[in-house]
Image (spheres, rainbow, N blue to C red):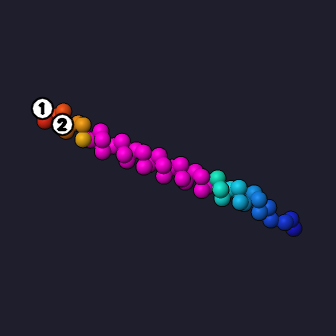
Amino acid sequence: MGRPNYSFQKRQKELAKKKKKEEKKQRKLEKQETPAAEEENPSLQED
């Protein structure tokens, strides 16, 4: 039986963590953009 490849496991864990961080960053940016767009639209509709 072979030895466990800990460096591979570590790299995979780091990649997963990085991917999750990027997804969270994207959600945060989308959340910031959405309220700004919603605020502009009602003011245009009221006129």
Which amino acid does the dot numbered 2 rest on?
Answer: Ser
Give the quarter of the figure containing the N terminus.
bottom right
Which amino acid does the dot numbered 1 rest on?
Answer: Asp
Residue 34 placement (x, y as % from top left): 33, 43
| Secondary structure found at label 2 | helix
Residue 47's place in the image compared with 3, above or below, is above
Q: Are marks 2 and 1 in contact (CB under 8 Å)?
A: yes
Residue 16 placement (x, y as % from top left): 61, 55
| Secondary structure found at label 1 | loop
Q: Which residues are magenta?
A: 16-38
Residue nearer the viewer, 31 or 4 = 31
Query: Residue, x 79% and y 61% (percent of image)?
Result: 5
Give the quarter of the figure containing the C terminus.
top left
Classify 10 Å Cα crowding around label 1: few (below 14), some (14-19), many (20 and above).
Answer: few
Residue highlighted by disc 2: 43
Residue highlighted by disc 1: 47
